[in-house]
Image: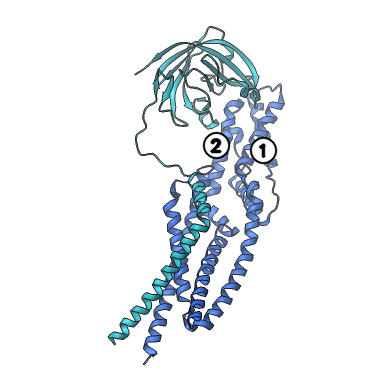
Amino acid sequence: MRIKLLLKYLLEFVLSILIFGFVMLLVFKSTIFNENYVLNKLEETNYYELLHNRIKENMSYYIVQSGLRKDVLDDIFTKEDVKISFNSMVKSLYNDSKVTIDTSKIKEKLESNIDNYLSKTNIFVSDSSSLDMFVVEIEKVYKENISLSNMFNLVQSKFYKIYTIIDKLLIALAITIIVISILLLLVSKLNWVSIPFMTSGILLLISNLFVKYNVNIKNIVFYNDEVSELIKTFILDVLNKISTYGLVLLTFGFVFCCFRVILINTSKK
Amino acid sequence: MHKKIVKVIKGITSQIVLSLFFSSFCIVGAYFLFGKTISNAMILINSTVVEKKDEKKQPVGFDSVKKRLINYPDYGEVWARIKIPKLGVNAIIYHGDSMELLKTGTGHYVASYFPGEGGTVLISAHNTSNHFGKIPSLVAGDNIIIEADYGTYTYEVIDGKVMKASELENINIQSKQEELVIYTCYPVGVVGYKTDRYVVRAKLVGEKYEN
């Protein structure tokens, strides 16, 4: 009898940890490791528009030293171009593909704008290589902003590795949870869910509080304002989901616990 | 009936207590197993946190004995004006020389010294006429004045020359005598991206502290 009880506690404890791990992975799988979620968030947070404006602003810094006028940068790329370029970078994370940012259209339009400006103002250019270098610099600004200074390439392989492992881990955890649940069901009949559910719920809520208490999320600054805002949104979304799942598990666990205790006591004569 | 209620409450309480015990056990286990990793992760994340200071920033001052600034300016903060009487230049100096700052003023290279500290003060600006566009016409003996929040410093031009942008890193910041180095893109008045820089060196000839 005592061994059975010890086995029950042990299985409940292991099941609690497994459910906690499963929910955590599920949250990550449905947020930052979910391509559609990330693309939707980019749209929701108006990221493309902000990135478009930032690129234009960064390009304008080169205008003063170039001796050209700001309007040579007009219409060399659109918000839609930024969206396509940035999405291709995001997608490369999820399929581990090598992506090169195509700036040929920008080059073509910029060269045409410069030619128009020079012909209108009758400026004679003795050394065209300086103009070529200017075009190259402007292309570089676009590439750097889209690739977040090559950050995508740096994290791509690690990200993809985690992305592929998560699926396998989720399946493995789901199978283990089912097996242990069956074992628990055999040992303790109806009462197999309440304690693991309540424990994993408490652990999820504590994890959420731990991060919120230890990290000053609203003051996170990373790369630039737009990326910082995006990261904050991701972190808050992950934490919100963790706390929601935690509350759901805790409630379910408590309801099952009440149901089971009441059932036992009312059926006893 | 009363006994049954007590039993139900006891049963529920025991399950809750067991859940709390399991949770505590997990937390203690996680602390001993992954405490260091979690702590390092928190440090890493918090390294990206920039706290907004509520207290009023102290003004930039100068310790004339130690020859050091008191309360250095923040990045992007205007801490002085640069005046070149011969060229009619009178521009603000930012702490920092990013392209964003150079759009509206001159930029002080953050790793260089401040006027009065005894090392090389490095300041750059675009080659527009209101900034450093005319500095190639400066000759030895011309004056450049920096009016900082903590004092006024007068420099006398030593020489000027054209350098490759990549050679700027060879400028000695730890000079034995205080020097002001100002530079801009070169050639001036030509369109396109410039890889050359016009660099003017000047020596300190006068300083006046302000209390």
Residue where numbered disc 2 is placed: A57
Height in image: A79 above or below B76? below
The image shows residue B97 at horizontal and vertical percentages of 53, 28
Q: Residue furthest bottom?
A: A269
Residue closest to the eye, B9 or A46:
B9
Element assignment for label 1: helix
Residue where numbered disc 1 is placed: A109
Height in image: A260 above or below A158? below
Q: Is residue B162 left or right of residue B120?
A: right
Quadrant including the N terminus of chain B: bottom left
Under mark 2, the amino acid is Glu
Q: Nearer the viewer, mark 2 or mark 1?
A: 2
| Chain to which the residue tagged by mark 1 belongs | A
Q: Is residue A173 visible to us here?
A: yes
Q: Colour of chain A?
A: blue
Q: Residue furthest left?
A: B2
The image shows residue A16 at horizontal and vertical percentages of 50, 70
Tell me the cyan chain: B
Height in image: B107 above or below A173? above
Q: Residue at x 44, y 46 (%)?
A: A219
The image shows residue B22 at horizontal and vertical percentages of 45, 68
Q: Residue furthest top?
A: B141
The image shows residue A172 at horizontal and vertical percentages of 62, 69
| Chain to which the residue tagged by mark 2 belongs | A
Under mark 1, the amino acid is Lys
Q: How much space separates mark 2 and mark 1, taking CA atoms?
A: 18 Å
Mark 2 crowd level (few <14, some 14–19, many ≥20, 10 Å Cα): few
